Structure formats: structure tokens, C-alpha cells
């Protein structure tokens, strides 16, 4: 166990692609919990695409990370010292301590999690923010009906993998879009999607047509760019597009959107941006359903694990480039 | 009264901007109504932006006009001969006979209109398809709440002018976007919008900011292109965009959409394409409300009238370029 706190801070705001030098590894003392406070040793750090947005200095739904500030992020850890009657040493908690080995807080934003019900890391993935993102985006905005075709980009990722499996549970044809044969094989063979289109194979439009013979009723959007443009050509009347992410554009200095907007008009398509944190008042029943599906084997998940906080910057950059399969985590201890 | 039918047909599919030579004026005999049929002399022809789409040979919600076919369009006319017990000579009817002086049909799609309740031309404008387009787009998708800011592009047009006035009735700040000082003056002084931004004045982003000090909650989209890009920068969280038209793009060989799609994501914006014909089962109560507002002077309207069917092509091209104020009509008789 480290006797020092190690943190990753934002050294400079990236222009275009994130470089390792935009992030800095710093050491400090382990903080001492004051009255009412809890000290947590983080065991797992979640790496997620939204973090790229927090590195920019623009108005958004959440504050930017300041230069010199600790990078934000979800964590699962163990209480090591508590001056708060709600927590005791050894409790496992889901928190938002960011990229660091230790975190301190008054406990208000901490949630206890049960390491017997699921592996701790699952609370950062299928039973956490990514799983809820899939659930609310697909079910609330996508409104899947049996017999429809649902397509999801970044299908091998933490969110996309859950989206397609929920679509299957709801009786839809589930089609993934992912980069490379290995990811596509995983999506179809391990996760049970009906088809997966490899956007790197050079025939996106044709392959997507073949995979969606009845057109597309729901497109769960994680990536944007060329993929969105190709999907737009296959949209059915009254299609829904939950707009969850645009990872292909986060590192572009001049982002692209959707040129063929007229297709949304003539097909009466609804495109709706959403952020999972807006749905937290309904998280409990959604998590209960996700937990049940995982327990029943209807939702499977995979993790890509980087070892040690020193490797978090490289793993994060890799994730932005699509190097991960499933949930990208950093094992901190 | 013409003793011949005069029609405007599609001579060639335009590439980019419509040219007068893409349309052809042809003469033919006045058709004879068969059993159960009605012959109507058209008095007014509606010219609308959607017609540009019908000139293209692409999959859409409605069939393309065939080469050599009569251009489609809404008409108001007078029954001159009827073999259908539902109609008699002298009845005024709203129909969809297209760009021609006479039309014949079995009467199923005809609706009688009352020339005493409103001028006949109004049934092609504020009390017709454009008025209903404004009503359903703003109220159903825009869901205006008192105190919000609603912005509409093509604000001096047949749809936009009604959108802003309904927004005012619903207690919103109504802001128009239009091309040129004359249109903007009309929108503010005659129609009662709170402000109007002249997108041709060279300071779209700055003028739009000044006109929307509390941001934008509803953007009723008629034009696309630069205007949409500028509006996106002012959208508030949970804004709604009824996507009604993209007139700035209809004549572009390579259309542009919205580059800054990430703004819809971080602000959780709903953008929804719609077509008024999907709402016809609810037209009656909407029309009743529009009629009441017109009668009470809460909704005002203006018309731009071309005289004679021979001038329809020029008037149509003019409308696509924004030459009209209010509803563009052709007076046929």
C-alpha cells in the first residue's frame, strides 16, 4: 500500500489529440480526514470518454478541470479511516475522487457497494454510470419496440456493449458498429448482437446496408463523424437517435457534425442529447434491472484493465483511440 | 376565364438552384369530369419551400414529381362542374391540384372552405398548411413555456410569422431571424415579435446574442446553414428544435448540416424533424384555435401575390431566395 497519495493532474489543455505531457503525475501526503470526513483508498478508477471534454475550457454541463487540478473520474475504493457515522473502515464505496490513490470527503456523494453481489469493478461499468447511460438512453429516448432495428456505435465499449444487449432483450435486431474484426467478433459471438459492422473495413455504407435490411429505427450515437453520416442514410421514418457521445470528434480542432440534416427532417427523426446524471432520481430501478440481467447472464461484459495509476494517461489516450474492449479501468491497488 | 387548362410541369431536375427552364408552361384541354368526379377551377396556388424537394429524384416522405409531370401544390378553387353529390357548382374547395388552372378528382381529398369566414387565400396560409405547421411544430415539439425564449428563422415567411406570434401568445420572448431590414421591421412592428435579427447585416452571432439575453429555449428551424450554427451557440440546457425546413440547403449540391453537434449533447437538446401531414387527425382543433387568434387580431399575416400562372416559376425561385414577405401565392384567376 502506497504511503503517499499519487495524483494525475491536468498540466495543459490539449489542442487536438491528448498527449501524455498534457497530464502530470504528482505525489503528495495522504490527506487526514477532519471531523465528519471519510478517507478512502481508491481501488479502481474508471476512464471514460467524457473526461476529454473536461480538459477543455468551455461552457458545458459540468466544470472544466483546472490547470493543475486532479483529473475527475469515478472510483471504487475502501474506507480506511472514518469520522463519519455512516461509514466504517473496510466499507466499499463508489465515489468520484478522480485520478488519485486516496480521496477525502464528507461522504455525501459516496455510495456503499456490495463486493459480494458483484465484483467491485462492475460498479464503474455495467452496474454503474456506463450501464445506466445505456439504459436511460436506449429505453427513455430510443423507446425500443420488438421487431425494430437498433444500431449502436462504439459497440464494443462500456456503454455500447450494454445498449445492444438491452436492445436484444427488448426484442430488437441489434447491430453494432466497431473498429476492427476482433471487436466485431466479440460483439457478435460473446455479446450476442445480430451483426456488427467494422467501420475500418472500408465499406461502411455497404456493410451497414447489409446489416440493416429493414433500415434503422434507433441509433444510439457514441461516435459521430463518418459513422453518423452513413447511419443517417439508413434511418427509417420516425427513427430515434439518443445522442450520448461523439468520441470521433472530441480531439478534432474543427469538429464535424451531420451534413445530411435533411434526412432527419424528411424522416421525422428525433435526435436528443442526454447526460446520465440527469436521470439519477430513477437510477435505483434501472440498476436493479441491470443487476438482474447480469445475474441471469442476459448481459455480459468485458473489461480492459491498466495496472497502476502511472499508466492511466496512456490508457486514457488509448481508449480515446479505441484500443479498449469493454470498460476501460485502471487498477489502483 | 381561360378556355384551356394551363399547367406548369417539371422539365428537368434542377442541379443546385432552380432555373426557370427547369419548369415548362404547357396548355391542354380542360378535363371533363367523369362519374363521381368534380372539376375545379383553381383560384389560388400556394408556393412552398417543400416543393424544391419534390423536384429531386430521391426517397422522401412523398413521391417526387416525374419529369413532364405537373408540379404539386395546394390550391383553393371553385367547383365548376360536379358529378359528385358532396359538391355543387360554386363551392369553394381546398385541394391539392398543383400548378394548373383546372383540376379534376373524385373529391376525396377536397375540403370545402368558407369564403365568408376568411379570405380564400388564407386557407393556403395562416389557416392552412403553413399555419398548422407552425402550430404543431411549436406546440407539440417546441412545448413553449411562459418566460422562455423562442427563436424562429425565416421569421417573415408564412410559417415563421405564425410561429413567433404563437410564441408570444404562449408568454415567450419571440425572436425572429430574417434577411434584410424591411423584413425585420415587419416582424417586429407589424407582427409584434420582441426582436428580429437580420442575418444579412454581417453580425449574426453578436446580434443574436443581444436579442437572446437569456439564451434560446426553442429554435424553430426553417433554414439551416450558418443560421443554425449561430443559434446552436446560444442554446440553453434542454432546448427543443422543431426541424421544419432547411431552405438555405435545398439548392446546395453539397448540403451542410450542423458541425457543432456536441452542443446538442452537452445541452441535452432535442432536435426533431416533422411533417405537418402526420398531424392531420388533429388539424381541426388547431385550425379552430388559429382562426380564433386571427379573428382576435392576435395573429396577423401578410401575403406576397404573383399574378397569373405564367409567373409561378419566377415567384417560386424568388421565394427560394427569400424575395417574399409572408405567404407566397399565385393568383390564378
Image: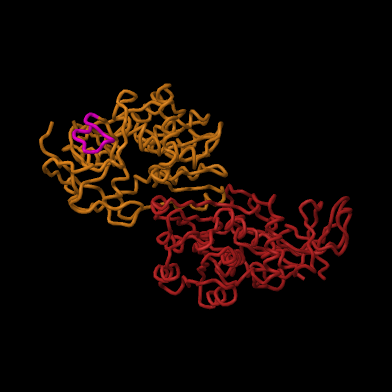
Chain colours: A orange, B red
Q: Position of residue A161 (x, y in %)?
A: 39, 32
Please, is residue B102 above or below residue B282 in the view? Answer: below
Q: Quadrant of the N terminus of chain A?
A: top left
User: Which residue is located at x 20 percent, y 50 percent?
Assistant: A69
Left/right placement of residue A314 relative to residue B297 reads: left
Is A79 part of what is drawn in magenta? Answer: yes
Q: Quadrant of residue A33?
A: top left
Query: Along the horizontal axis of the image, is B77 left or right of A152?
Result: right
Where the C terminus of chain A falls, by quadrant?
Answer: top left
Q: Position of residue B231 (x, y in %)?
A: 44, 62
Residue A317's x, y, as percent? 24, 42
Look at the magenta stretch and give its main secondary structure: loop
Relative to B14, say whether A120 is above or below: above
Q: Nearer the viewer, residue B211 or A3?
A: A3
Residue B48: give x, y in percent of width and height: 63, 62
Residue at (52% x, 36% y) in the render:
A144
Q: Residue furthest top?
A: A296
Given residues A251 and A292, the one toward you in this image is: A292
In magenta, the rendered stretch is A78-90
Q: Is residue B243 visible?
A: no
Q: Is residue B171 magenta?
A: no
Amino acid at each position: 500500500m502506497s504511503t503517499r497519495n499519487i495524483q494525475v493532474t491536468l498540466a495543459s489543455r490539449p489542442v487536438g489529440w491528448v498527449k501524455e505531457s498534457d497530464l502530470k503525475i504528482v505525489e503528495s501526503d495522504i490527506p487526514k480526514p477532519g471531523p465528519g470526513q471519510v478517507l478512502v483508498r481508491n481501488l479502481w478508477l474508471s476512464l471514460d470518454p467524457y473526461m476529454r471534454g473536461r480538459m477543455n475550457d468551455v461552457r458545458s454541463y459540468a466544470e472544466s478541470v483546472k490547470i493543475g487540478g486532479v483529473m475527475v473520474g469515478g472510483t471504487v475504493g475502501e474506507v480506511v479511516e472514518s469520522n463519519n457515522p455512516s461509514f466504517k473502515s473496510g466499507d466499499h464505496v463508489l465515489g468520484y475522487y478522480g485520478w488519485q490513490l486516496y480521496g477525502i470527503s464528507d461522504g455525501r456523494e459516496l455510495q456503499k457497494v456490495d463486493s459480494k453481489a458483484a465484483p467491485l469493478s462492475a460498479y464503474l461499468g455495467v452496474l454503474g454510470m456506463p450501464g445506466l447511460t445505456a439504459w436511460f438512453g436506449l429505453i427513455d429516448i430510443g423507446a425500443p419496440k420488438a421487431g425494430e432495428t437498433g444500431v449502436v456505435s462504439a459497440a464494443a465499449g462500456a456503454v455500447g456493449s450494454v445498449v445492444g444487449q438491452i436492445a436484444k432483450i427488448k426484442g430488437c435486431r441489434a447491430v453494432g458498429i466497431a473498429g476492427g474484426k476482433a471487436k466485431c467478433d466479440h460483439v457478435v459471438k460473446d455479446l450476442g448482437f445480430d451483426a456488427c459492422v467494422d467501420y475500418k473495413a472500408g465499406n461502411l455504407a455497404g456493410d451497414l446496408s447489409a446489416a440493416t435490411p429493414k433500415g434503422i429505427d434507433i441509433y444510439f450515437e457514441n461516435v459521430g463523424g463518418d459513422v453518423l453520416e452513413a447511419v443517417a442514410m439508413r434511418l427509417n421514418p420516425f427513427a430515434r437517435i439518443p445522442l450520448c457521445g461523439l468520441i470521433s470528434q472530441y480531439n478534432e480542432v474543427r469538429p464535424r457534425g451531420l451534413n445530411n440534416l435533411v434526412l432527419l427532417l424528411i424522416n421525422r427523426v428525433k435526435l436528443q442529447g442526454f447526460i446520465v446524471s440527469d436521470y439519477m432520481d430513477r437510477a435505483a430501478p434501472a440498476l436493479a434491472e441491470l443487476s438482474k440481467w447480469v445475474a441471469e447472464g442476459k448481459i455480459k461484459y468485458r473489461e480492459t484493465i491498466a495496472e497502476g495509476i502511472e499508466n492511466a494517461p496512456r490508457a486514457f489516450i488509448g481508449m480515446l483511440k479505441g484500443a479498449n474492449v469493454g470498460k476501460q479501468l485502471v487498477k489502483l491497488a
